[in-house]
Image (cartoon, rainbow, N blue to C red):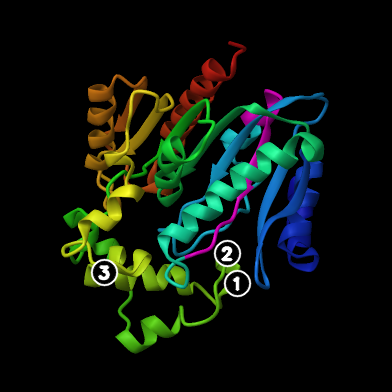
Amino acid sequence: MIAKLLPRLGALGVAAGLAALAAAAGEKMTTYTYKQVGSLAIKADVYEPDGFAGPRPVLVWIHGGALMSGSRELEPDHRLKRSMLADGAVVVSIDYRLAPETKLPAIITDVEDAFRWIREQGPGLFRADPERIVVAGSSAGGYLTLVAGYRIHPRPRALVSYWGYGDLIGAWYSEPSRWPRHQKLFLTRETAYSLVSGPPVANKADRPGEGGANFYMYCRQQGIWPREATGWDPKREPEKFYPYMPLRNVTPDYPPTLLIHGLKDTDVPAENSRLMAAEFRRQGVEHRLITDPEADHGSFWSPEARAAIDAAALEFFRAHLAPR
């Protein structure tokens, strides 16, 4: 059934097409605007399980894309989404404004407002249980998941960070990258900035082509991602970054956290998750670190390894969503 629906995506539009795919999979998907900034609607896709009454626990999924690209749309075979729905949870996948048109403090404000909307409007709109919220995300979404651990109140029940990071000013981000993955496209400064010179956007589809991803590559080549994402110089103004760095904001009441990272990651070094794990140990925070010696960033995990880490994430969430 799902395979037959795929060709219709172009005709229906992305949102309507994903809703049709969700219906075919036995789930309901509704797109909401959780925040309006001027003329820009910032949206969330809410997937509801079939056959479960409320109140229902909530998984908030935060997409990656280096804070400069990405979108809330989840593919039909997103394993963690499907597993959480099968357990009776609601899955809320959020957009947020993207850098560099919008800087990091405002991006985090969007994430905070998304949680506020879920807690205030979720019980009425999709029978959410505001006391049982967990969070997961990958890469920049993993970073924002870790940010949620200390910026969101009440704190989420548990977090899962897939190849995320708690540091924003280390050499890996603030100096030119040596990795081949960041050398595949070369742009002039003028061309690079022209890709992101329009009004604020909250979804990569709001820009032509792959403007955000290509601008990110330019930033990694130049070692300027922290400056472009925040407006601050990490070497001259490191203190301005500290409130937005999970590594510097872990306290004993930080939520239980599962960290997942490939040891061959050439985009976000695995040291980022190791540093977070060390800080969790120092503060006495419940945590677990899963690494794969052969895995690179994101989609560069083998199907078997990806299935294993998604199963670990599901079990971690199950343990922490159980009634207290």
The three-letter amino acid code for the residue at tag 3 is Ile
Q: Mark 1 vs mark 3: which is more N-terminal?
A: 1
Residue at 41% over, 60% down: 104
Q: Is residue 46 visible?
A: yes
Q: Is residue 302 visible?
A: no
Q: Is residue 178 above or below residue 211?
A: above
Q: Residues within 10 Å of mark 2 (few under 14, many from 20)?
A: many
Q: Label 1 belongs to which residue? A: 206
Q: Nearer the viewer, mark 1 or mark 2?
A: 2
> Seen from this angle, which residue lies furthest top?
324
Range covered by the magenta-colored residues: 83-98
Circle 2 — which element?
Answer: loop
Q: Is residue 254 above or below residue 204?
A: above
Q: Is residue 179 above or below residue 198?
A: above
Return the x and y of residue 290 as percentages of the image width and height: 34, 28
> Which quadrant would residue 14 be assigned to in this image?
bottom right
Q: Mark 2 vs mark 3: which is more N-terminal?
A: 2
Q: Residues within 10 Å of mark 3 (few under 14, many from 20)?
A: some
Q: Is residue 153 above or below residue 104?
A: above
Q: Residues within 10 Å of mark 1 (few under 14, many from 20)?
A: some
The three-letter amino acid code for the residue at tag 1 is Asp
Return the x and y of residue 131 as percentages of the image width and height: 63, 25
Residue 202: mark in rendering = 2
Residue at 71% over, 25% down: 88
Residue 224: mark in rendering = 3
Circle 1 — which element?
Answer: helix
Residue 39: mark in rendering = none
Q: Is residue 37 left or right of residue 211?
A: right
> Which quadrant would residue 120 be assigned to in this image?
top right
